[in-house]
Image (tube, rainbow, N blue to C red):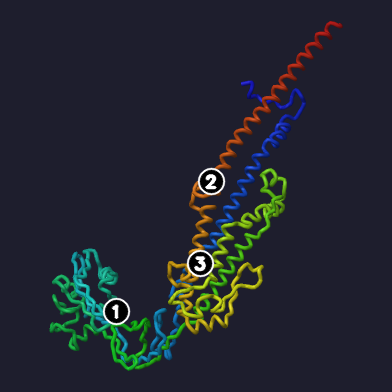
Amino acid sequence: MASNLRIGGLASGMDIDQLVSDLMKAERMPLDKLYQKKQILEWQRDDYRSMNTLLQDLDNYIFNNLTLQSSMLKKKVTSSDESAVTATANSSAVNISTTINVTKIAKAATWISNGTENFQSGTTRTISLDVTNGDGSTKNGVTVTIDASDTLDSVISKLNSNNDLGITVFHDPQTDKVVITKKDTGSAVRLVINDAATATFFQELGFTNAAVGKELGDTNGDGVVDANDAAVKTAGEDAQFTINGLATTRSTNTFTINNVTYTLKKEGASATITTTNDTDAMFNTIKGFVDKYNEIIDKINAELKEERYRDYPPLTDEQKEAMTEKQVELWEEKARSGMLRNDSILSSGLSKMRMALYTKVEGSNITSGFSQLAEIGITTSSNYLDGGKLIIDETKLREKIQENPDAIYRLFNNDSTNYSEKGIARRLRDTIKDTIGKIEQKAGKTLWTNQQFAIGRNLNQINDQIDRFEDRLKQIEDRYWRQFTAMEEAINKANSQSMYLMNAFGGGMQ
């Protein structure tokens, strides 16, 4: 127990706490170096990951904008009278001019009952209908279960929520009538009653002549809904129109012909629909890519060129305590500068991206005059300080887009396993993916453990060294205290003996 005692200079008069503290500062210096090395590795890891974030942003832009036909090859559609007909077109539509004369707008079928005074709740039953939609498609045996607790309102809610029926139902309390409207338009619409329970249900809703095997609305039982049944059912109608002289019909007012989707809006009207290439959309997409590319390589180049201040190591906690917040901020700004200076992974990645951009795209489906970026008005800045930024000749790019947008799309997206025939966007994405992979092997990503990447493994080793060194420091500190404690005990013993002798000799002289 005596060896654990710490005597703080009572006998010697020395400040043992301060002496031990000063001695331990010298002993801690290698540990401080380890913490500084750990901090540098963590800064480097974080800077690598920020570079991967930039590269991933560029890859996402390329995928979402340059590689998708719907983004690059947009069509512009105009209508001479949008109150009559409007239209949209997908990227596969050809450039045409189409005249449409609208004879009739498609309408939905509607059924109106006589009143719900006979509706009865309190009985569980299942109704069944065969449904024919406006386009002629059928869904047979569509069922709805009516519970004993259901009210008229809850029954109507169940009918509305059944997607297979495809109807909208409401009850007008003022007239007590139920109105059923088919959600889709067209003349083919039918609701056919399958069984007696269903017939009884609709009779209670006011469709008094509802019968098994008959269409709802066939009030006279002749098997068809005609003028004699108009009081119950207003039949759906097909759209009737003439397109470039051809008279035709559709069950809906919106339909697609040759990748152009038309919407009819007004009867007795006409409009001319014109489809052209949307050169502005392609120009803006390519310009957006150039801006994104320039922004990202500018940031990566800045990281590669950033000055490394080796005279500014990371601060220890003790050093930070002795400085103001501003001093710490300025110091650490220099301390963490240049973590990726001249990094080989990033430098190689930029070189490969430049090669991907400027290597000629070959192949039988590549149009002459559209095989290199320079041919469509995109070149590299002549200022070497720009680090390979792209410059757009906007006039030339617009002219080339107007001349052959499909050829420009192939320049970016030609699909091939042969590098020389692979489109620029595909080459870039391959290079970015490869660079990101190498950075991840070096610096990992958020969900990875330290053991999965190089810097992480180095951090694990340093952490082990720190743990061992801290254990060693505890032993050294204990040793110093034992030594000083022994010294204090010896001095104390000597003082006691001296006092004894002085008292002894003093007593003899008397």
Please give the label number shown on residue 305. Answer: none
Disc 3 versus disc 2: nearer the observer: 3
Contact? badges 2 and 1 (CB < 8 Å): no
Secondary structure category for the residue under label 1:
strand
Disc 3 residue type (three-letter) = Leu
Rendered-image quadrant of the N terminus: top right
Q: Is residue 178 above or below residue 1?
A: below
Q: How many marks?
A: 3
User: Disc 2 marks which residue?
Assistant: 457
Nearer to the camera, 507 or 243: 243
User: Disc 1 marks which residue?
Assistant: 184
User: Disc 3 marks which residue?
Assistant: 428
**Horizontal and vertical percent for residue 235?**
24, 84
The residue sitting at 64% across, 28% down in the picture is 478
**Horizontal and vertical percent for residue 302?**
64, 62
Secondary structure category for the residue under label 3:
helix
Secondary structure category for the residue under label 2:
helix
Q: Is residue 474 left or right of residue 225?
A: right
Nearer to the camera, 134 or 507: 134
N-terminal of the two: label 3 or label 2? 3
